[in-house]
Image: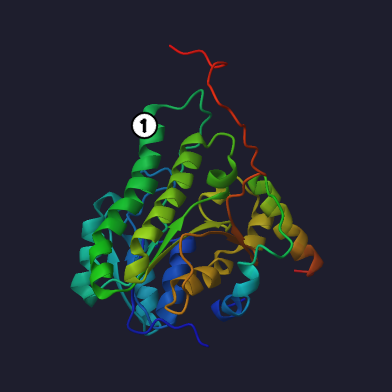
Amino acid sequence: MSIRFDGKVVVITGAGGGIGKVYALFFASRGAKVVVNDLGTSNKGEGNNANAADKVVDEIKAKGGQAVANYDSVEFGDKIIKTAVDAFGRVDIVINNAGILRDISFQKMKDVDWNLIFKVHVFGAYSVTKAAWNIMREQGYGRIINTSSAAGLFGSFGQVNYSAAKLALHGFTQSLAREGEKKNIRVNTIAPLAASRMLETVMPPDILKTVQPELVVPLVAYLCHESCQETGSVFEVGGGFVAKLRWQRTEVIIFIFRELSSIPRP
Amino acid sequence: MSPEDVAKEWDNITNFDRKCDYPTSGNDTFGRIMEFREKANL
């Protein structure tokens, strides 16, 4: 079976570089029409440079693919989805990939560090998905990928804000998956380990070579394909490694009680 | 590694009856990736 996306419209946030760019080039190479969203900010969420999205669109077009650029912040998901509908008439796949870092120890963290991370990662994913949701429901088809992180799944020093936002995205996935099930909308989370502007800040170049973003694409492509019915799940992926994770519970201990006399009451 | 390869391995990727492990940090995952790459001479 060949995994192709002919006729499908894919919206990828943060697609001006890193994994997002690799997604965009891949989906276009497999027949999809691509909306390349990128505000062009630094990895701290500062500045903006429309060139990032334009360059990816040019690269796709040069190879005979179809793509349009969008330069809006993910806070304005309606504008991003409007770009897809105006250019291609529908939206089939949303990959919530845009992200920034504001790493700092919790002791020194300021409200702005917390709020900016939640605005981009959590509100951004909500805003883009919300704008696409009714379109997907009406067409009875949709695939959504939310991007979490090992920091969200396991914790990471200096990333309390980022960890909290990244695990929030999996909660978002799990409930959306339930709401989308009857309308053939499948929603999954990935926790990628891949060379990116963000990872460059914490890993040496020789190690980064082993986790090229191209090695995240195969899992995401399959999860986005119409043949894949997986939904509400979370996967770790990177460097050729793919694994599904789940919550696990210890053997339950049931305490039999007939009265609450041992617990002080107000 | 391609999407088609992932599709072929899907039952194994999602099968918790096979040997599972219990990662406690992102470093565990990274360690597994590096171990796998070393064994495969990559």
Q: Residue at x 26, y 75 (%)?
A: A139
Mark 1: secondary structure: helix
Q: Residue at x 35, y 74 (%)?
A: A58
* Residue type highlighted by circle 1: Val
In this rendering, the count of numbered labels is 1
Q: Provide residue A38's location: percent of width, then percent of height.
A: 34, 58
| Residue located beneath label 1 in the image | A112
Q: Is residue A255 above or below residue A123?
A: above
**Residue A48 visible at all:** no
Q: Label 1 lies in what chain? A: A
Question: Is B18 left, or right, of A76 in this rendering?
Answer: right
**Residue A148 visible at all:** yes
Q: Is residue A159 above or below residue A96?
A: above
Q: Provide residue A66's location: percent of width, then percent of height.
A: 32, 79
Which sits in the foreground, A219 or A188?
A188
Q: Is residue A108 above or below residue A86?
A: above
Which sits in the foreground, A259 or A60?
A259
**Which of the 4 image quarters holds residue A30?**
bottom left
Q: Residue at x 66, y 62 (%)?
A: B16
Farthest residue toward the front? A258
Q: Provide residue A81's location: percent of width, then percent of height.
A: 25, 63
For the C terminus of chain A, the quadrant is top left
Farthest residue toward the bottom? A1
